[in-house]
Image: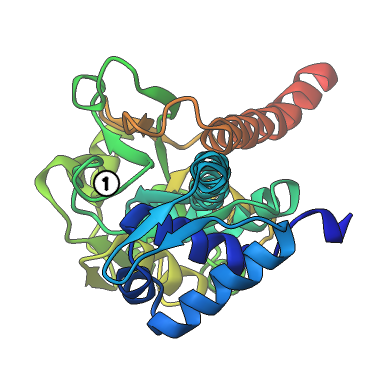
């Protein structure tokens, strides 16, 4: 069957020469010399057993056979170009650009991302982590996970989860300080978030006020401008942090952090929650649907795990 078709280079040279009616211009287009194009056309004619061009002194004309063959070859090459562009586009579509906050990326998404890659090995995830809210269309973002109030998320947004806050500390510090009630935090170093105004609920004074406990004077404080740095400091044993549930759930399960006053000593965050927002061009793409579905399955699995201890406790009661 290989003998049924001429070489692709011969067909490309012929198509260019027939389109331009010039070996010289065809050579310029294909980065070949005029004589190279001429030899390609001659080889094609010998293969077919017909003349494709009338060669004049200063003109090049297609024969009747050349006209018919040119139409067929041009259609075939156009089809190959379209198919090639489609395959390349599908490969590019398999690259998924995801935007989210530094905190969500470092504490929740990145530790789980290998799980998505294992079930979707053909999808490459490009993660853009920064706290600035990006314009999805202008900045080439396919999916954003945003922490914001419902109106800011938009009507088409998918809610993942809200947040609760509770004190967390490393097991080493807990063993040393033996924290049993909020008043015991007077012996601790409190890790404070020096963040933006809408995170006022993530401060120690608000937590103590919600617990209806007068805030004691702590042994010391440390301030951070990035929340994930607070959690890193808490894991390293530098003090007690206000953990954002479920962002710190993995660390609690792994015993890298513990909740000294129990999981019930939580305060609800403001009306903000984590929402999935899609760009207009991303909607309906298989890899986008797969990623959103995976996010939702991770959230559902975490809710199920969180409910099991409560269910067992209720059964014992």
Q: Nearer the viewer, residue 14 or 131?
A: 14
Q: Nearer the viewer, residue 7 or 108?
A: 7
Q: Point out residue 20 in the picture as x, y percentages from the top left corner.
A: 32, 58
Q: How many labels sit on residues?
A: 1
Q: Point out residue 10 in the picture as x, y percentages from the top left corner.
A: 60, 67
Q: How is the image coloured?
A: rainbow
Q: Is residue 143 left or right of residue 296?
A: left
Is 80 placed above or below 17 here? above
Q: Residue furthest front?
A: 57
Which residue is pictured at 33% across the width and 35% down the height? 211
Quarter-of-image position of residue 57: bottom left
Q: Is residue 215 left or right of residue 120?
A: left
Which residue is pictured at 72% across the width and 58% down the height? 49
Which residue is pictured at 28% across the width and 33% down the height? 210
Q: Residue furthest right?
A: 1
Q: Nearer the viewer, residue 155 or 288?
A: 288
Q: Point out residue 85 in the picture as x, y percentages from the top left corner.
A: 49, 49
Quarter containing the C terminus = top right
Q: Residue furthest top?
A: 155
Q: Nearer the viewer, residue 123 or 20?
A: 20
Find disc 1 in the rendering and name its residue: 202
Observer able to see residue 133: yes
Quarter containing the N terminus = bottom right
Which residue is pictured at 63% across the width and 29% down the height? 303
Is 110 placed above or below 134 here? below
Q: Residues within 10 Å of mark 1 (few under 14, many from 20)?
A: many
């Amino acid at each position: 069957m290989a003998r049924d078709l001429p070489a692709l280079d011969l067909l490309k040279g012929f198509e260019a020469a027939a389109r331009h009616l010039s070996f010289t211009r065809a050579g310029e287009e294909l980065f070949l010399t005029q004589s190279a194009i001429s030899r390609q056309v001659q080889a094609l004619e010998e293969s077919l057993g017909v003349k494709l061009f009338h060669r004049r002194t200063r003109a090049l004309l297609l024969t009747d056979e050349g006209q018919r063959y040119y139409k067929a070859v041009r259609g075939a090459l156009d089809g190959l170009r379209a198919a090639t562009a489609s395959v390349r586009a599908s490969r590019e579509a398999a690259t998924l650009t995801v935007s989210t906050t530094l905190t969500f990326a470092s504490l929740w998404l990145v530790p789980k991302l290998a799980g998505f890659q294992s079930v979707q090995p053909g999808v490459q995830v490009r993660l853009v982590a920064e706290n600035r809210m990006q314009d999805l269309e202008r900045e080439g973002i396919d999916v954003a996970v945003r922490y914001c109030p419902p109106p800011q998320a938009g009507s088409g947004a998918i809610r993942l989860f809200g947040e609760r806050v509770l004190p967390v500390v490393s097991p080493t510090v807990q063993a040393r300080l033996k924290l049993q009630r909020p008043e015991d935090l007077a012996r601790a170093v409190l890790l404070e978030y020096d963040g933006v105004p809408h995170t006022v609920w993530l401060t120690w004074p608000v937590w103590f006020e919600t617990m209806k406990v007068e805030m004691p004077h702590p042994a010391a404080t440390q301030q951070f401008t990035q929340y994930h740095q607070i959690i890193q400091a808490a894991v390293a044993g530098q003090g007690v942090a206000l953990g954002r549930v479920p962002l710190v759930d993995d660390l609690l399960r792994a015993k890298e952090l513990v909740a000294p006053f129990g999981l019930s000593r939580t305060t609800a965050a403001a009306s903000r929650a984590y929402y999935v927002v899609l760009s207009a061009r991303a909607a309906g793409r298989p890899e986008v649907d797969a990623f959103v579905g995976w996010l939702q399955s991770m959230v559902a699995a975490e809710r199920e795990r969180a409910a099991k201890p409560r269910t067992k406790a209720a059964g014992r009661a």
